Amino acid sequence: MLSSTSLNPITSPKIPFFSSFSIQNPSLLSFHLPFSPSKTLLKPISATLIPSTPQPQQQQLYQPFRPPPSPLPPKFRSLDTQGRLDVLANRNGLWFEYAPLIPSLYQEGFSPPSIEEITGITGVEQNRLIVASQVRESLIQSKTDEDVMSFFDTGGAELLYEIRLLSASQRAEAVRYIVENGLDAKGAQDLARAMKDFPRRKMDKGWKSFEYGIPGDCLSFMYYRLSREHRNPSEQRTAALMQALQVAESESAKKEVSEELEGGEDEKPEKDDDLEYRVRVPVVRMQFGEVAEATSVVVLPVCMAEEDTKELLEAPLECRSGGDFGVVEAEKGWKRWVVLPSWEPLAGLRHGGVVVAFSDARVIPWKSNRWYKEEAILVVMDRNRKEVEVDAAFYLAMVDGGGLKVDTGSALKEMGVKESLGTVVLVVRPPKEESDDQLSDEDWE
């Protein structure tokens, strides 16, 4: 191994540094050494390697940055910061013309509170103007009728803001319906939510009678669903059905609502045999962002199926919300909770509701040839209904110490089980991009 002591410097100038062996090819040496070992080894430098005249400079590849076209209207593009603030303070021009001035001020370091202090436009209104102007621009790009768009020239930002979550085609239909029916901001909000929510309700009663592409039908179906959350008969149910009939557009939707309205009070109590035949547990595929868009939600304690029944029995029985902010308060602390939209099966589940989380959906007795799914599910259960009564109903039970299991009343009766842990009211599947795999009645065993 070489070291600093083994590499002694050459002190005698008479002894050449390179041996005759190392300079057998002097031309090669002259190109790679930083100095020449001897004057006799020097060769003229070829002009072909280092040109006598400097090469012309290569074309400059760097292109200066060019900012994208300004979103500001032409008459506002030349304004400085103070000029833009003055336009906003005085509301000069149409609302969709000065709305883009707000994000341009954000880019310069202004905050919503500082803009509010100078111009008087609140932070909420700033956001509404920005979003509404973007919605209006998307409607123009999708070739929406000019007569409809002219309605929003002098106002209507609060209406366009409410349809922000709809697709471009849905927005065009929504604004047409809003203008023709003179909806206010609350009406536009209800319409947008009804149109957004409609495709997710395939399992609900009467869904096929309403047309997805007709805004009035979507709104009618929302009221139709709302009516089923009230007792029959009741004033609230009748009022909701009257609203549904008033806004329905297609003949099939009007017929469905009319039959529900006229035949609801004449319905006879169901016999036990009929009830058993009709018992079905809804299976819902959650949608991304569905909880955020829900008008009302339900908060329920969660237990893991892998744990013993002691945890299930100790879970809080009731959660209440109250006060101006709807603060949720449970009767005791718990470590796991889930927030679900207030679907119809959950609307009346105020006391005794609990969720059991299963890591494998095969605990559910549906037909394995189509729904033998290895995915996590949530089983919502009513602990107030423990007695195994209806053969076609589904119950959660602990059978022979083999863990929690969901089974039919008839199967539990055959095993001698008379009391379960609770009746299953809903099964929730996790969200995924493709959601056209809902269960039908024929999929259950």
Image (cartoon, rainbow, N blue to C red):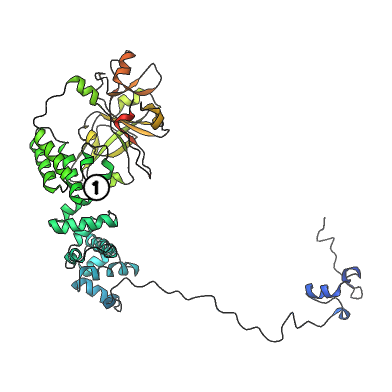
Residue 23 against residue 435 in the figure, above or below: below
Picture residue at 29% right of the left edge, 44% below the top = 291
- Residue 63 point in image, percent of width and height: 49, 75
Q: Which residue lies under the disc numbered 1?
A: 212
Element marked by disc 1? loop
Look at the image and tell me in which quarter the C terminus lies.
top left
Residue 187 against residue 236 in the figure, above or below: below
- Residue 396 point in image, percent of width and height: 32, 24
Picture residue at 20% right of the left edge, 51% below the top = 215
Q: How many marks?
A: 1
Picture residue at 10% right of the left edge, 37% below the top = 261
Q: Nearer the viewer, residue 389 or 99?
A: 389
Does 172 sit left or right of 63 as displayed? Answer: left
Q: Based on the displayed image, in which of its 4 quarters is residue 183 positioned?
A: bottom left
Q: Based on the displayed image, in which of its 4 quarters is residue 10 positioned?
A: bottom right
Look at the image and tell me in which quarter the N terminus lies.
bottom right
- Residue 82 point in image, percent of width and height: 27, 76
